[in-house]
Image: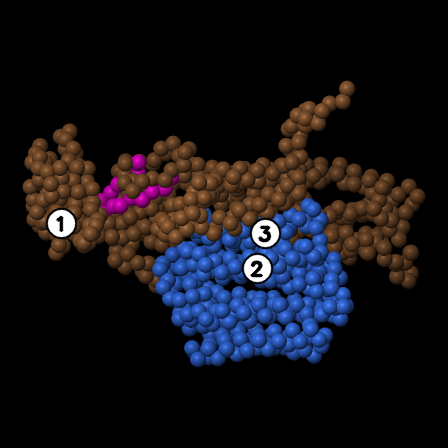
Chain colours: A brown, B blue
C-alpha cells in the first residue's frame, strides 16, 4: 500500500530539516532576506533612540502606528529577525559539519585519503595525460608551483593540510561568533554611576539610579566592588593630546585596591568583567545632614545649580536615619543657591556655607560646590570570546579564500596510460584548467610524447 | 601649503575630468588614441592627487580620515589607483575607465563641496584603532573597486558589436575575468571583515559596546553580507557571468553609500565625524 505525501514527509522530519539547513539556495535566500531586512529597518529611527524617534513618530504618525504595531520599532529584537538569525546559525553549523566531514579524510586519515584518490584516478580519471612518463607529468605539475611527491605508479600534489581545514573552521567560527553575540546580549548588563569627587559607589543594582539595562540571564552578577572617584582633572594630557576632563578612578574590594587610573576616551578601565568608561563630567553640590538621633551624613550630589525658568532640574535624595526615611529634593534657586523640598514644603534658598532647618528635626547645610563623574559600566563576560571567534573566523576565511585546498593526482591506469584527477574549490576553477593544460602539453623534442 | 594643496586638488579634478572624457570617446568611437590619452590623464591626476593628499597630511598632522572632504578624496584616489594598476596588467580593462574615472571625478567633486578646514583628532578619535580601521576600509574599497572594474568589463565584453567590443581581444577571457573578479571580491571581503572587526573592538573601547546597530554599522554589515552572498553564489551554486557582474556592481554602490551617503542621510554617531560642515562633537 503506498503512503501519502504527508506521511512520507512526516516519516523523515529530522532529515528534511537537515537538508533544508544545508540547502545552498535556502542559504542564499536567507542572506538576501536578512540583508533586505537590515536595509528596510534603517529607514526609521528605533524606539530607545531618544528624541530622534519621538520627532520622527510625530511627523509620520500613520506610518509609526504601523511600525509600532508590527513591532518593527525595535527591529533587532523582533521575532522575525531573531528567528532568521537563529536559522542562520543553524544553517552555518550544518554547513560547517558538512565541510568538516569533507575535510576529515585529508586531515585525519591522509594516507587512506591519498590511496583512495589514487585508486579512483586509476579507475575513473577525469582526463588522460598525453604523456605516459610519470617523471614528466610530475615535472609539469611542479611547474605550476605544486609540491609533488613522485611514486612508482604516479605523482601526487596537494595543498598543506591547513588549506583543507580552513573552510570548516571559518564556518564553525562564524556560527560560534553569532552564538556568543546572542549569549552576550542575554548575559550583559550596563548602566551609569554618578560619583562625585571624593565619593564612591558599590557595583550593585541600587547604585544605578538611572536604571540598569540587563539581559534576562544576567542573574544579578554584580561584583560588589567599590568604585571611587578620587579627583577630577580639568585637563588630562596623554602623548601630547588633551583628553579632556578625566576622573581618577580607584576600584577596591574588601579594602584592597584592584585598579587605579584616569579614565578618558579610548582608555576605559577593566576590572574583572567590568568595563568602565568616562561618560560625562558635571557639577555637584556637597551637603551635610544632621538628624534628630544625632547622626550626621555628608554626601555629594550631582546637581546643576543653574535655575531654569519653567522646569528646574531637581535631584532626589532618599535619606534614612534611625529607621526613619527622609525623602528630599534639591531644587535650584537664583544666584547659585538651592532650596530643599520635603513633605513639609519647600525651604528658603540657601547659599554655600548656610544651613536650613527641615521638618522632622533635620538640618541641611550646603557645604559647597564640587564635580561629579558619570561612569558608564558594562558587564559582558562574552567579549573576549567574541574577539577570539572574530580572529579565528578572519584568519580561516583568509586561508580558505586565498589558499584554497587543491590536489592533483596522476596515476597509471591498467592500460599503461596516466589518468589525471583534480580536487579544487569552485573559487579556484582556473587551477583545474591549468592542470589540464599542463598535462595535455606535448613534450619538447627529445622527450616522449 | 594651503595654496599648493588647493592647486593640486583642482588640477586633479581637471585631469580626472579629462580622463573620463577621453575614455568615453575611446569607448563610444573605438579610438585607441583616446584610451591612451585617458590613461595618461588618469596617471597624471593620480600624481597630483597624491601630492594634494601628502601636502594636507603634513599640514594637518594626520592622515586623510577626518571629515567628509578627506574621506571622499581618499576614496577617489583609491578608485583611480586601482584602475590604473589594473590597466597596467590588463590593457583591455581600459574600456571600463569611462565608468571608474567618472566615479572618481564625482566623488572628488562632492568632496570639494564639503568644508575643507582641518579637523583635529580628539576625543574618541584619538586612538590607534582609527588608523587600522580606516586603512582596512580603504583596502576593502580598493578591492571592491577592482571587482567593479572587471564586472563592467564582463558586461561590456558580452555585448558584441557594441562599444568596447573592438577591445575584446585584449581582455582576459570570460573565465579569466570571472576569476579576477572573484579574487578582488575575496580580498575585499577579508579586508572588510577586518574593518568591521576592528571597528567593533574600537567601539567597545570607546563606548563600552561593540555593536550599536548604528546606521553606518548596519550598512557596512549589509555591504559585507552582499559580498558574502556573491561568494556563496559562486562557490556553492556555481553562478557565473552577467548576474554575478551586476551583483558586484550593486554591492559597490552599497559600499559607497555606506561610506559616503549614510553619514549625510542618517543621524549617526559616525556621521558626526563626516558631516559636510564643521561641528565635530
Whichever of labels 2 and 3 marks the residue nearer the N terminus, that label is 3
B162 magenta-colored: no
Note whether residue B205 is visible. Answer: no
Tell me which residue sits at (45%, 65%) in the image. Answer: B68
* Mark 1 burial class by Cα count in 10 Å: few <14, some 14-19, many 20+: many
Q: Give the quarter of the image for residue A299.
A: top left
Identify the image quadrant of the N terminus of chain A.
top right
Which residue is identified by label 3? B226
A191 magenta-colored: yes
Disc ID at residue B253: 2
Q: Farthest residue toward the right?
A: A415
Describe the element under mark 2 as helix, strand or loop: helix
Residue B226 appears left or right of A302: right
- The CA span between labels 2 and 3 is 11 Å
Instruction: Kindly identify which chain the residue marked by label 2 belongs to.
Output: B
- The CA span between labels 2 and 1 is 57 Å
Q: Nearer the viewer, residue A431 or B170?
A: B170
Q: Position of residue B5 (x, y in %)?
A: 46, 76
Q: Nearer the viewer, residue B13 or B56?
A: B13
- The CA span between labels 1 and 3 is 58 Å
Q: Position of residue A216 (x, y in %)?
A: 41, 33
* Mark 2 burial class by Cα count in 10 Å: few <14, some 14-19, many 20+: some
Q: Is residue A303 above or below residue A119?
A: below
Residue A393 appears left or right of B163: left
Instruction: Kindly identify which chain the residue marked by label 3 belongs to.
Output: B
Q: Position of residue B141 (x, y in %)?
A: 56, 60
Tell me which residue sits at (75%, 46%) in the image. Answer: A423
Q: Give the quarter of the image for residue B116.
A: bottom left
Q: Which residues are magenta?
A: A189-205
Note whether residue A343 is visible. Answer: yes
Residue A320 appears left or right of B176: left
Amino acid at each position: 500500500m503506498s503512503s501519502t505525501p504527508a506521511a512520507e514527509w512526516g516519516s523523515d522530519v529530522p532529515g528534511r530539516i537537515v537538508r533544508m539547513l544545508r540547502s545552498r539556495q535556502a542559504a542564499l535566500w536567507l542572506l538576501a532576506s536578512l540583508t533586505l531586512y537590515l536595509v528596510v529597518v534603517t529607514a526609521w529611527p528605533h524606539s530607545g533612540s531618544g528624541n530622534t524617534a519621538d520627532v520622527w513618530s510625530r511627523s509620520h504618525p500613520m506610518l509609526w502606528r504601523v511600525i509600532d504595531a508590527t513591532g518593527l520599532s525595535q527591529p533587532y529584537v523582533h521575532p522575525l529577525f531573531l528567528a532568521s538569525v537563529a536559522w542562520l546559525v543553524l544553517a552555518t553549523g550544518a554547513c560547517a559539519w558538512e565541510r568538516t566531514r569533507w575535510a576529515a579524510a585529508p586531515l585525519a586519515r591522509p594516507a587512506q585519503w591519498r590511496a583512495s584518490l589514487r585508486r579512483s584516478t586509476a579507475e575513473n580519471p577525469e582526463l588522460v595525460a598525453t604523456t605516459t612518463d610519470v617523471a614528466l607529468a610530475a615535472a609539469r605539475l611542479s611547474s605550476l608551483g605544486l609540491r609533488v611527491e613522485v611514486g612508482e605508479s604516479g605523482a601526487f600534489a596537494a595543498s598543506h593540510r591547513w588549506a583543507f581545514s580552513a573552510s570548516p573552521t571559518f564556518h564553525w567560527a562564524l556560527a560560534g561568533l553569532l552564538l556568543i553575540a546572542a549569549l552576550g546580549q542575554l548575559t550583559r548588563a550596563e548602566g551609569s554611576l554618578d560619583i562625585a569627587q571624593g565619593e564612591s559607589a558599590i557595583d550593585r543594582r541600587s547604585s544605578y539610579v538611572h536604571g540598569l539595562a540587563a539581559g534576562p540571564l544576567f542573574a544579578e552578577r554584580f561584583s560588589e566592588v567599590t568604585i571611587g572617584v578620587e579627583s577630577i582633572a580639568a585637563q588630562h594630557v596623554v602623548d601630547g593630546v588633551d583628553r579632556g576632563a578625566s576622573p581618577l578612578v580607584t576600584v577596591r574590594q574588601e579594602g584592597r585596591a584592584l585598579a587605579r587610573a584616569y579614565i578618558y576616551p579610548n582608555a576605559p578601565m577593566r576590572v574583572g568583567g567590568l568595563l568602565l568608561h568616562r561618560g560625562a563630567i558635571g557639577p555637584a553640590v556637597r551637603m551635610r545632614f544632621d538628624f534628630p538621633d544625632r547622626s550626621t551624613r555628608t554626601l555629594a550630589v550631582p546637581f546643576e545649580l543653574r535655575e531654569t525658568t519653567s522646569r528646574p532640574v531637581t535631584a532626589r535624595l532618599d535619606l534614612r536615619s534611625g529607621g526613619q526615611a527622609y525623602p528630599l529634593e534639591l531644587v535650584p534657586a537664583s544666584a547659585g543657591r538651592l532650596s530643599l523640598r520635603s513633605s513639609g514644603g519647600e525651604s528658603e534658598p540657601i547659599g554655600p556655607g548656610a544651613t536650613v532647618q527641615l521638618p522632622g528635626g533635620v538640618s541641611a547645610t550646603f557645604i559647597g560646590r564640587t564635580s561629579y563623574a558619570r561612569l558608564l559600566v558594562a558587564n559582558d563576560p562574552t567579549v573576549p570570546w567574541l574577539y577570539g571567534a572574530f580572529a579565528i573566523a578572519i584568519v580561516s576565511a583568509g586561508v580558505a579564500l586565498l589558499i584554497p585546498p587543491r590536489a592533483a593526482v596522476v596515476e597509471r591506469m591498467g592500460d599503461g596510460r596516466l589518468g589525471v584527477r583534480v580536487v579544487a574549490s569552485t573559487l579556484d576553477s582556473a587551477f583545474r584548467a591549468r592542470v589540464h593544460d599542463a598535462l595535455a602539453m606535448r613534450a619538447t623534442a627529445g622527450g616522449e610524447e | 601649503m594651503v595654496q599648493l594643496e588647493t592647486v593640486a586638488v583642482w588640477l586633479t579634478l581637471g585631469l580626472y575630468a579629462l580622463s573620463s572624457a577621453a575614455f568615453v570617446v575611446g569607448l563610444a568611437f573605438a579610438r585607441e588614441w583616446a584610451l591612451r590619452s585617458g590613461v595618461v590623464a588618469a596617471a597624471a591626476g593620480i600624481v597630483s592627487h597624491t601630492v594634494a593628499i601628502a601636502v594636507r597630511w603634513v599640514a594637518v598632522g594626520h592622515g586623510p580620515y577626518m571629515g567628509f572632504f578627506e574621506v571622499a578624496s581618499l576614496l577617489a584616489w583609491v578608485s583611480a589607483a586601482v584602475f590604473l594598476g589594473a590597466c597596467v596588467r590588463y590593457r583591455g580593462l581600459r574600456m571600463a575607465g569611462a565608468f571608474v574615472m567618472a566615479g572618481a571625478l564625482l566623488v572628488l567633486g562632492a568632496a570639494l563641496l564639503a568644508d575643507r578646514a582641518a579637523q583635529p583628532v580628539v576625543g574618541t578619535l584619538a586612538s590607534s584603532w582609527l588608523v587600522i580601521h580606516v586603512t582596512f576600509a580603504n583596502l576593502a574599497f580598493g578591492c571592491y573597486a577592482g571587482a567593479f572594474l572587471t564586472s563592467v568589463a564582463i558586461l561590456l565584453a558580452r555585448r558584441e558589436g557594441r562599444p568596447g567590443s573592438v577591445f575584446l581581444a585584449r581582455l582576459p577571457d570570460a573565465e579569466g575575468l570571472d576569476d579576477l573578479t572573484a579574487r578582488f571580491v575575496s580580498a575585499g571581503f577579508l579586508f572588510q571583515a577586518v574593518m568591521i572587526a576592528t571597528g567593533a573592538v574600537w567601539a567597545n573601547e570607546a563606548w563600552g559596546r561593540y555593536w550599536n546597530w548604528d546606521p553606518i554599522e548596519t550598512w557596512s554589515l549589509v555591504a559585507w553580507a552582499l559580498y558574502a552572498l556573491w561568494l556563496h553564489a559562486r562557490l556553492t551554486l556555481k553562478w557565473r557571468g552577467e548576474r554575478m557582474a551586476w551583483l558586484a556592481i550593486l554591492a559597490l554602490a552599497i559600499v559607497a553609500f555606506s561610506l559616503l551617503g549614510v553619514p549625510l542621510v542618517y543621524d549617526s554617531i559616525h556621521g558626526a565625524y563626516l558631516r559636510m560642515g564643521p561641528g565635530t562633537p
